[in-house]
Every structure is written in structure tokens, then in C-alpha cells.
Image (cartoon, rainbow, N blue to C red):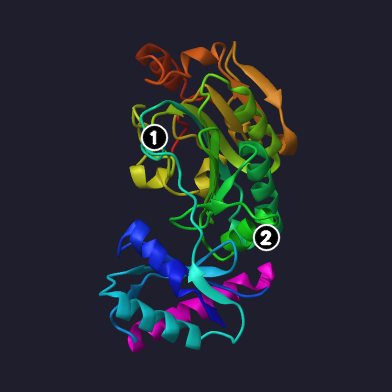
Amino acid sequence: MTVDHASVFRAVEANGYDDVRVEYAPPAVARAAQPALVRLVEEAARAATADAPGVWAESALPSVAGAAVRLKDLSGPGAVTAWLDAFAARLPGDGAVRAVPVAALPAGLLRGAEPRLTAYLALDGAFTDDADEAERWCRRALHGVGARPLVATGPFYQAAPPDAAAYLAAALHAGRPVEVVDAPVARVALNPDGQVILQRYTWEDLGPVRQALLDGAARTRLGLVAVTSVWALDWSDRGRLPRPPHVPVDALARNDARWGGAIPDAHGLMLLTPEHLRRASVPPGWQPTPASGGRVLVEAPDPRAWLRPEGPDDTVLAAARARRRSPCGPGRRR
């Protein structure tokens, strides 16, 4: 076992005593066994914290090379050294313990106010239930963001490894949210419950997001597109858009089965299921495009009226919401 104390102390100098990430990197990571690896590191970190109480470790997460923990409340260099040695002693006798190589996002990107074209998708099942579907979506995400993606399975970003799709899918299957980012081009966030968020920073260009909705249509309960001003974490992160009527905020934070037959609010671009369309026909003037799985992509006559940083005009939104029995209305509550 190699313990790279120097890399950890460099991370302490760079990030401070409350933001140091340490990973166990075995000689080779079998991605199918990564949940077991995360549990192993979790147990080793818990034992090290008991043996060397001058350091506290957060829950373990997958890392590109293995599994990692973030160290906090470091009481001093001696405590860090003692914790690292105790941590390594609880792990197999090969591989390395070292600081996680972390990639930095551009300053201000996370919470900047610049417009972002955001698509919200609710899939018809959880990624934790279907590893193959998880990997398909991870491959779409990596293909769609840009040439130099960063990946995250927790609160830190790393350069994407060659087998990034398998790595991300394993994390999803283990119940961890993941992200793929190519700043400042695009971002895809996938939650284990099957909620997907796609964001692009060339917000006037609807083409890539429109194609992403069509590519994943077959197993999508509902897709919505809007311009937001935030790094969206879930459907409730809508920037300056009005809050949807008749829908509690907590419902928007989850991938709920109700979205297969109900729409929380009107949007200028929506991917709808046969159940949505059984309840109502496409409004006059709106453009329907057939998609796989019987889904239909429904577009407003003038998408530009909806794709504005400040959201659609009140009259445009009110007119769409008034069509309660049409696909552009919020739908009947069940």
C-alpha cells in the first residue's frame, strides 16, 4: 500500500482544512464491484476516525480511480498523518491512498445569472433499477456536452476517464447523483430516481436540447424546456420563471409517476406521452413531432416567445395555462 502524504498536504494548503478529499485507488477498479468498494472505503474511514479522532470524514463516494472521502475538522498535520495511516491499515495491501485530483470549474459558473437553456426530463423508472438504461443515458450525456468533459459523482469534479460512462452508471446504480460538465458549453445531471436535467449556455440555440429529448424519448414520462438563470438541481430551480399553479414545490423535486399523465406547467417545448395525448389533443398552431415510444414533441408556434431569460410574457403563459384540457396546460390533478 502506498500512502501519498505529500499529495494530501498539498491539498490542505490549496483548499484549507475543511475541503480535502482522499481516495483509495486500487490497482484496477472493476466497475460492477464499485458499490462494494465504496462500502469498503466507508468502513475504513469510519474506523480511521475512531482510531485517529483529530480528523472527521464524510460519507464515501465513487471517484474516477476508486472511492473517496472528504476530510473535515482537521486538527493539525500530526492528526492528518495518523488518520491516513489508520485509513490505509484498514484497506487491502495494494493500491494507493492519496489526494483526489480535482478539476476546478470556472469561477461563478455554478451560481452565475447568465441565461441557460434547461430541459427537465422524468424517465419512466429509476436508474437504480436498470443499469443498462443508466449507462445509455451516461453515454448520451458524455456525447452531448462537449469535447473535454468533467464528471462528478459527488461535490467534486474530475477529468472524465476512458470508461466514464461505465463509471457514472455504476455510481447511479449505487444511488449517487452524477454530473457531466463541459464548462461553459453544457451540463447534464442525472439523479438516481430517473430525473435528468440538461443545460446549455448558448440558450438561443434550441437544436441540441430538442434532439436530446427526441433521442431519449422512448422511456421518458415527461420532458419540459425553459430558459433559467440558475445551475438547476431539480424542477423547482426555475430561476425567474413563475411558480407553477396547483403544484407543491416538493413535488417538482422528485421524479413522480404522476408526470406520465400530468404536466406541472405550460412550456414552449414539451415531450408528451400517449397518456397525455389521450386526455387532450395538440392545440391548434402547435407543432407535433412524433418520437419513439409513442411520445410526441410538442412545440409552441413561436418558441422564441418562451425562450427568454425573464421567462415567457405573462399573456403568453396565461393563454397556455388557460387550456386546461390541452397538453400546454397544467393538467388535471389526480
Queried whether the magenta region covers residue 41, the answer comes back as: yes
Segment colored magenta: 28-51
Q: Is residue 315 left or right of residue 222?
A: left
Queried whether the magenta region covers residue 43, the answer comes back as: yes
Residue that label 1 marks: 230
Q: Is residue 300 left or right of residue 266?
A: right
Comparing 57 with 245, the one in front is 57
In what quadrant of the picture does the C terminus appear?
top left
Decide: few, some or many residues near mark 1? Use Cα within 10 Å; few <14, some 14-19, many ≥20. Answer: many
Comparing 16 with 126, the one in front is 16
Q: Position of residue 283 (x, y in %)?
A: 57, 17
Residues at marks 2 and 1, CA–CA distance in whole angstroms? 30 Å
Comparing 15 with 91, the one in front is 15
Image quadrant where residue 282 sits? top right
2 vs 1, front mark: 1
Residue at the location (27% across, 70% down)? 73
Q: Position of residue 56 (x, y in %)?
A: 32, 75
Residue that label 2 marks: 131
Q: What kind of residue is marked 2?
A: Ala
Label 2's element? helix
Q: What kind of residue is marked 1?
A: Val
Mark positioned earlier in the residue sequence (2 or 1) = 2
Above/below status of 55 relative to 115 = below
Above/below status of 288 relative to 234 = above
Label 1's element? loop
Residue at the location (36% across, 38% down)? 111
